[in-house]
Amino acid sequence: MDFRNAWHRDTDAEVRCIACGETVTRSDAREYDKYGDRWNRDNKSFEYLCKPCYREYCHFDRSGLEDRLEAAGAGTVSRDAFLRRYHDLADETEQTRADGR
């Protein structure tokens, strides 16, 4: 099987951006692997970021990101509640770093 052609067939599939929730074609998205190993593709499914969110968000330090997302209730609470919780957790993390802890 020619994997290059298989990938091209999937570029018109629609995916949902995990940052903003917009649905975009696969060709207008970037893969996101929460485990940081996007090159190991065996038996793996990916989440996606639309290109604007990818440019805006993906270059921040990801240390503790998955734990913070879970603690904020990602996917289990309303968007407003999640954003409020995430912001509070991010502030706590930043304050801890500033205090040298």
Image: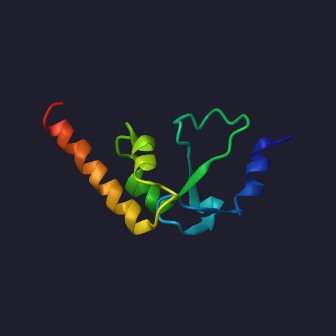
Residue 43 at x, y = what percent?
73, 37
Against 72, is 52 above or below?
below
Against 98, is 49 above or below?
below
Locate residue 23: give its quadrant. bottom right
Q: Residue furthest left?
A: 99
Residue 101 at x, y = what percent?
18, 30
**Which residue is rendered at x = 54% and y = 61% of the image?**
17
Determine whether, in the image, residue 30 is placed left or right of residue 13. Answer: left
Location of the N terminus (image quadrant): top right
**Which residue is rendered at x = 53% and y = 36% of the image?**
35
**Which residue is rendered at x = 78% and y = 42% of the image?**
3
Q: Considering depth in this image, is 8 or 56 the residue closer to the camera?
A: 56
Residue 59 at x, y = what percent?
38, 46
Locate residue 38: give its quadrant. top right
Q: Considering depth in this image, is 4 or 78 the residue closer to the camera?
A: 78
**Which residue is rendered at x = 52% and y = 42% of the image?**
34
Determine whether, in the image, residue 95 is placed left or right of residue 14. Answer: left
Against 60, is 42 above or below?
above
Q: Considering depth in this image, is 9 or 16 the residue closer to the camera?
A: 16
Say how many tags the image has. Answer: 0
Determine whether, in the image, residue 27 is placed left or right of residue 7. Answer: left
Residue 94 at x, y = what percent?
22, 44
Q: Considering depth in this image, is 94 or 54 the residue closer to the camera?
A: 94
